[in-house]
Image (tube, helix red, strand yellow):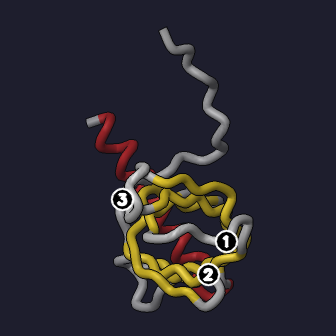
């Protein structure tokens, strides 16, 4: 039987898919989040990114008219399968959120987490 490892994450992650635009160097790709927290984001992308590399992410959330500008560093990435055209799962540690929409970002995450806890209890 596989031993369950202790949870190391400091923050709960939301699994709601959100549209993002990822910019790594000259490369720009649109995708969706697989999970998101105040300190990290996971997404799928078509090609491997430079690792560890700086990335810029424009996150679209329903409660904001403008995308949330996030900067971060690629901390891990894995190819989903051995097939040549298989996408990569990428984990980015968030290093900054633009000040002018930081409150929108955190409020949105809090609302999602509150809603998910409330749904479990009812």
Q: Nearer the viewer, residue 119 or 52?
A: 52
Write down the residue under mark 3.
16
User: 17 above or below 2?
Assistant: below
Mark 1 and mark 2 lie on one chain; the one further toward the N terminus is 2
Mark seen at residue 24 = 2
Query: Distance from label 1 to label 2 (Cα)?
Result: 8 Å
Residue lying at the far front of the rendered structure: 84
x then y, percent, for residue 108: 46, 68
x then y, percent, for residue 60: 42, 80
- Mark 2: which secondary structure? strand
Residue 6 location, quadrant: top right
Residue located at (70% from left, 66% from top): 51
Mark 3 and mark 2 lie on one chain; the one further toward the N terminus is 3
Query: Distance from label 3 to label 1 (Cα)?
Result: 26 Å
Q: Nearer the viewer, mark 3 or mark 2?
A: 2
- Mark 1: which secondary structure? loop
Q: Nearer the viewer, mark 3 or mark 1?
A: 1
Quadrant for the C terminus, please. top left
Write down the residue under mark 1.
50
Mark 3 and mark 1 lie on one chain; the one further toward the N terminus is 3
Q: Nearer the viewer, residue 69 or 119?
A: 69
Residue lying at the far top of the rendered structure: 1
- Neighbor class of circle 3 (other Cα within 10 Å; few <14, some 14-19, many 20+) is few
Side (left or right) of 115 relative to 90 = left
Residue located at (68% from left, 84% from top): 99
Mark seen at residue 18 = none
């Amino acid at each position: 039987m596989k031993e369950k490892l202790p949870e190391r994450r400091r923050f709960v992650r939301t699994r709601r898919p959100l549209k993002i635009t990822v910019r790594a160097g000259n490369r720009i790709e649109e995708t969706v989040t697989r999970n998101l927290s105040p300190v990290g984001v996971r997404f799928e992308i078509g090609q491997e990114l430079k690792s560890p590399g700086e990335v810029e992410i424009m996150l679209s959330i329903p409660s904001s008219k403008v995308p949330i500008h996030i900067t971060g560093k690629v901390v891990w990435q894995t190819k989903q399968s051995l097939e040549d055209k298989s996408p990569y799962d990428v984990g980015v540690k968030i290093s900054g959120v633009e000040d002018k929409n930081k409150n929108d970002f955190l409020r949105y995450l809090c609302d999602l987490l509150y809603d998910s806890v409330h749904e479990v209890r009812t």
